[in-house]
């Protein structure tokens, strides 16, 4: 269970009081989440809520995520959750040394990986990338996620695991990364971690995209590469037919510019290494959940296998 915090009932009640939520009848820890504690709270006379405790992000980082979600709500993006605001008009609570967010609870299921579900996810991602948002006050993705520049820096560092470094150099050995860095790709708000298991479906329809923790202003092609790398799978391997169909569905909403089409395959690999590095920072170098310390290897091995197939 993703219940790292083990909140006392008195702490939960104090958090809910900040939102004038009373009459709690049930607290159900949730299994979803690898860097947060999540609880569904039920009430006598109020719709259920999801209480999230951040075990990874500080208050500023968590607030940056809520700024994006509130901006998406203003643009009427249908697939994101909007945080409750407390009595002080703030989206992030603090209580007894904890901080987090309260959201409406959505009763959905993580989908199976199949063509129809991935089509829905791809169209939602295209819709997100089509939004025109005021970017001035929204954070940059590099503050919470990893792009090509971050990866290049990391593989030059002594702490970089040798298998990560070797895999990176093998996969990108024939790619002009310097030229790629100089290419101007379209950018805007990206999710940063849209694997299929960060979506909720009801009756075979997408209802919500969750976990915008790595969202920010970034390159759309990076976001697309990340989503493909963690969604278009048969077993634990990338499937080219699913990839092609995902891209076709995405392009029905947002056609890819020429430079993005040419770089897509590379960005699928960058997406895999990006999330692998996120896992390294949290679990291998960090102490969030040491049972996941080796989980980054799943992604670099997936990249190597895909590299060998194409």
Image (tube, rainbow, N blue to C red):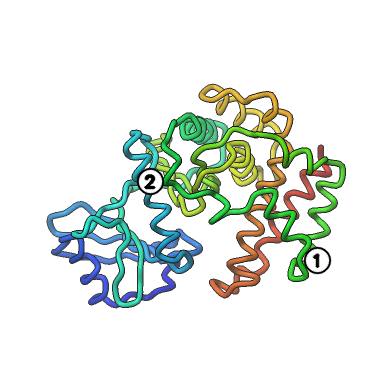
Location of residue 18 (image quadrant): bottom left
Q: Give whichever of 123, 15 is nearer the camera.
A: 15
Left or right for 281, reference 110: right
Return the disc, 2 or 1, that comes first in the chain's sequence: 2
- Is residue 232 in view from this perspective? no
Q: Give x and y (percent) for residue 225.
A: 64, 40
Left or right for 181, reference 71: right
Location of residue 98 (image quadrant): bottom left
* Up-down relation of residue 266 to residue 213 (above or below): above
- Look at the numbered discs 2 and 1 and tell me whether their residues touch, using CB distance below 8 Å: no
**Count of marks placed on residues:** 2
Which residue is at 65% across, 47% downward?
271
Question: What is the CA distance from the residue labelled 2 to the residue labelled 1?
Answer: 37 Å
Q: Which mark is residue 223?
A: none
Which residue is at 80% across, 55% downward?
167
Q: Give whichever of 8, 201 is nearer the camera.
A: 8
Q: Secondary structure at mark 1?
A: helix
* Up-down relation of residue 264 to residue 155 (above or below): above
Q: Which mark is residue 69?
A: 2
Q: Give x and y (percent) for residue 133.
A: 42, 35
Which residue is at 42% across, 54% downward?
64
- Is residue 294 in view from this perspective? yes
Q: Secondary structure at mark 2?
A: helix
Label 2 or label 1, whichever lies nearer to me, is 2
Crowding around mark 2 (Cα neighbors within 10 Å: few <14, some 14 to 19, many 20+) is some
Q: Give x and y (percent) for residue 197.
A: 51, 49
Residue linked to disc 1: 162
Which image quarter is the N terminus in?
bottom left
């Amino acid at each position: 269970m993703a219940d790292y915090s083990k909140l006392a009932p008195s702490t939960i009640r104090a958090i809910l009081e900040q939102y004038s939520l009373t009459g709690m009848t049930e607290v159900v820890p949730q299994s979803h989440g690898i860097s947060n504690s999540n609880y569904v709270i039920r009430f006598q006379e109020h719709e259920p809520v999801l209480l999230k405790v951040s075990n990874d992000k500080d208050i500023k980082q968590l607030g940056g995520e809520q700024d994006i979600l509130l901006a998406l709500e203003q643009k009427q993006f249908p697939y994101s959750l909007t945080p409750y605001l407390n009595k002080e008009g703030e989206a992030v609570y603090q209580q007894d040394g904890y901080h987090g967010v309260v959201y409406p609870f959505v009763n959905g299921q993580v989908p199976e990986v199949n063509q129809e579900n991935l089509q829905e996810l791809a169209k939602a991602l295209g819709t997100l990338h089509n939004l025109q948002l005021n970017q001035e006050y929204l954070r940059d993705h590099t503050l919470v996620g990893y792009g090509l520049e971050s990866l290049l820096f990391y593989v030059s560092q002594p702490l970089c695991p040798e298998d990560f470094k070797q895999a990176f150099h093998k996969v990108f050995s024939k790619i002009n990364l310097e030229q790629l860095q100089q290419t101007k790709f379209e950018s805007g708000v990206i999710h940063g971690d849209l694997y299929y298991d960060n979506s909720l479906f009801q009756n075979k329809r997408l209802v919500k995209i969750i976990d915008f923790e790595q969202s920010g202003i970034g390159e759309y092609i990076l976001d697309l590469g990340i989503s493909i790398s963690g969604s278009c799978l048969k077993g634990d391997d990338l499937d080219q037919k699913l990839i092609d169909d995902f891209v076709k569905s995405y392009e029905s909403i947002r056609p890819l510019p020429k430079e993005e089409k040419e770089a897509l395959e590379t960005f699928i690999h960058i997406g895999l290494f990006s999330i692998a590095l996120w896992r390294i920072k949290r679990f291998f170098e960090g102490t969030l959940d040491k049972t996941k310390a080796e989980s980054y290897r799943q992604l670099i091995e997936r990249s190597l296998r895909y590299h060998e197939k194409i």
